[in-house]
Image: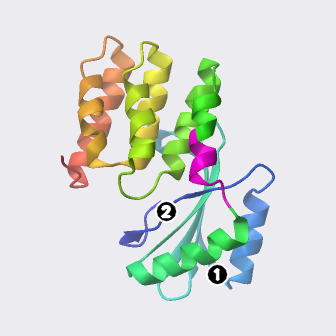
Amino acid sequence: MRWGRIRGRRLVLRDGDGESDVIECAALMKAEMKREVTASPEVGLAREITWAVAWRNYLHYGQEYPYGSRFVMLTGADHDEVDTLTRIVSDYFEPLEDAELLDAVVCAHEVEHRRAMLVRAGIGAPTSCDSAFLAPITEAMRDQNARIREGGLWAAMYALWPELLPAVMELTVDPEKLLRDQAGALMRYMKREGITP
């Protein structure tokens, strides 16, 4: 889901906002649909749509798998253009704010709910490292519960900050084989993308 060289921040949609609302937004932007994919769980998405918008930019809609968090994102060739379009789309949708994303992680006491909120926070994390997000994601990857560690790893997969690499690297020797494999795959991907400490 990265067509433009520059990636804007993912905007996590509120309950009640979904695909039909993003389609309506794209129509208002006079965007042209370029790609539509259903069920790509190998890349963490159940649904993905991409539209071309003004100035060689792209509007992306995604629905995360397995928890169903929905988000929009802009990509393009120029930082200022992507930032401007991200602000416009943010004003249109009024997505979840940082405090809401982080409070949901803190308030989630059941394992599966906490995993879902960690993933959602990773999706909505800023494009560069933010300590308010870094701490709960890192702590989750070091949790005693393997399911929480995996939720933290999935959050790291969305955030993709170099600052997360030490905790991801720790998971490459996790007692759980699945976590070792997933952490190894994420390390390889980050290396290919030039994400280094």
Q: Is 167 part of what is drawn in magenta?
A: no
Asked if 59 appears above or below 62 in the picture, the reply is below
Does the segment drawn in magenta span residue 98? yes
Residue 119, position in %: x, y?
53, 38
Instruction: Using the rendered image of the protein, determine whether residue 99 is visible from the camera's viewpoint.
Output: yes
User: Is residue 117 left or right of 78 when viewed as pictured?
Assistant: right
For the point 52% across and 81% down, the residue is 84
Q: In the image, which is nearer the foreground, mark 2 or mark 1?
A: 2
Position of residue 134 measured from the top left corner of the image (x, y, whole percent) = 39, 41
In the image as oriented, which residue stretches furthest toward the right? Answer: 16
Q: How many labels were placed on the picture?
A: 2
**Residue placed farthest to the bottom in the image?**
55
Are there few (<14), some (14-19), or many (20+) residues within 10 Å of tag 1? some
How was this image coloured?
Answer: rainbow
Residue 120, how many percent across, how many down?
A: 57, 42
Left or right of 193 in this view: 89: right
The residue under label 2 is which amino acid type? Answer: Arg
Q: Which residues are magenta?
A: 95-102
Q: CA distance from mark 2 to mark 1?
A: 19 Å
Residue 184 horizontal side relative to residue 176, left or right: left
- Residue 31's label in the rendered image is 1
Residue found 18% across the figure and 46% down from its top: 197
The residue carrying mark 2 is: 9
Q: Of 11 and 22, which appears nearest the observer?
A: 11
Q: Main secondary structure of the magenta part?
A: helix
Of pointers 2 and 1, the one earlier in the residue sequence? 2
